[in-house]
Amino acid sequence: MGQLESARDVALDILIATEERGAYINLLLNDRLKKSSLNDTRDRGLVTELVYGTTQRRNTLDWILNALVKKGVHSLEMWVRQLLRMGLYQLRYLDRIPSRAAVHETVNQAKNRGHKGISGLVNGVMRGYLRRRSEWNLPDLPQDIGQLALLYSHPEWMVRRWVESYGRETATAILTANNEPPAITLRTNPLKTDRQALIHYLQEAYPEAKIAPSEIATQGIVFQGGGNPALHARYQEGWYSIQDESSMLVAEVVGPAPGQRGLDGCAAPGGKTTHLAEQMGNEGELLSCDIHGHKVALIRANVNRLGLTMVKTRQEDLRTLPEKVDGLFDFVLLDAPCSGLGVIRRKPDIKWSKEATEIEDLVGLQAELLDAAASLVAPEGVLVYSTCTIEPRENEEQVAAFLARNDTFQLDERIEEKLLPKVKSKALLREGSIQILPHHFRSDGFFISRMVKRAET
């Protein structure tokens, strides 16, 4: 009989795979846990904590390790580098794990995966940190961008942009929120059940969980602890979807009506498409496009799971779609490709995979997509532009540039009518647009702008 895998071994496998493949850790984590022999919820919770925490705190951990490893942390084999990060994360950030246990388990992992010299190195680094840990104390009130970046474990360029865009106090709140664990939120499918009935059912199925209606999304449910609702049969039967609360607001801002003709131009994996179709009562026509074939398959799978028959899926680049479809649409949603800087708590590896220079390339692509989307909107129709970033260049500045070159569109001030009171009281509301920051509701950072095409004269 083979040796049972430990939570730390599973976590290390995921961290190694993340660096090797460049894949998002949330996807790797979910896939690896499904295949794991770990059944205890505490073990699975430790895996999640180690993977997310080690990734979130990477630059702070490397700052320390560079002082403890003779030639620097990047001189090490990749698996050793990830093992040391994970071991040091336990010593520095997980008070509930005794230091002795963290050192012992990390050294054992080194012995099992490498030669004696590796385990000796790991032991020396871990114990060296314990002896000298006061050398790496950071001030509670950082004095400059560099200290902020180390204390909250973000790249300096990112911290600098947020301080410039939002001010130091708000930037600090964003940085803090990005290091908190993401919540699980569900979206009720009203074609199958209602929200209160679903909450009652889930509470019986998961008695240890804390389940409550969302205060910011009308179909939303907040699910805390007590299991994984994506594994329940009712999920497969289409009673609900897993979607962030901020993301749910996009379809609510569109506000489609039954019988309309609509387009979701960059739709994968289909969360907003299916939400739009639910709001339309599965009546009308909704075209859901994505440039990638395998992502169109994801949209189709979600559509089928939820029992939606009005959605048509199509592999298409939105920029070439205008010349390939007949007629215009009552509403067009462009949930644009973006830097993703609003979803760092869910995908912390974004911090280390993105560069500031990429933003300008994205701005150019977004502008092309917006122009194409606009050409498909019928007179008096609605155009909604959304992103999951908090970067102004991709958000309000992008919309302002679009309106400057498209005088047939105007911002819709009625956007506030589509938002719940708590959203209006905390989020950043501008004319026709809303910016949600990660600390506002412990949800993803999102930007949504609603525009209306002027009537023909």
Image (cartoon, rainbow, N blue to C red):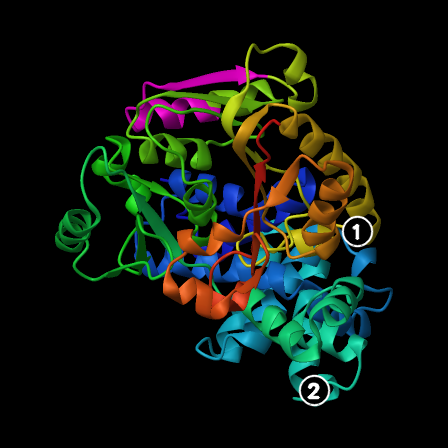
Against 185, is 90 above or below?
Answer: below
Disc 2 and disc 1 in contact, CB within 8 angstroms: no
Q: Quadrant of residue 277?
A: top left
Q: Residue at x 76, y 79 (%)?
A: 147
Which quadrant does the N terminus fall into? top left
Q: Give the residue at mark 2.
A: 137
Q: Quadrant of residue 143?
A: bottom right
Q: Is residue 343 visible?
A: no
Inspect the magenta stretch and tell me whether residue 287 lies in it.
Answer: no
Label 1, secondary structure: give it: loop
The amino acid pointed to by label 2 is Asn
Q: Give the residue at mark 1.
A: 355
Q: Is residue 394 left or right of residue 456?
A: right
Instruction: Name the residue nearer the viewer: 438 or 116.
Output: 438
Range of residues picked out in magenta:
298-315
Instruction: Name the residue nearer the viewer: 32 or 232.
Output: 232
Against 355, is 104 above or below?
Answer: below
Instruction: Name the residue nearer the viewer: 210 or 117.
Output: 210
Q: Is residue 291 left or right of residue 45?
A: right
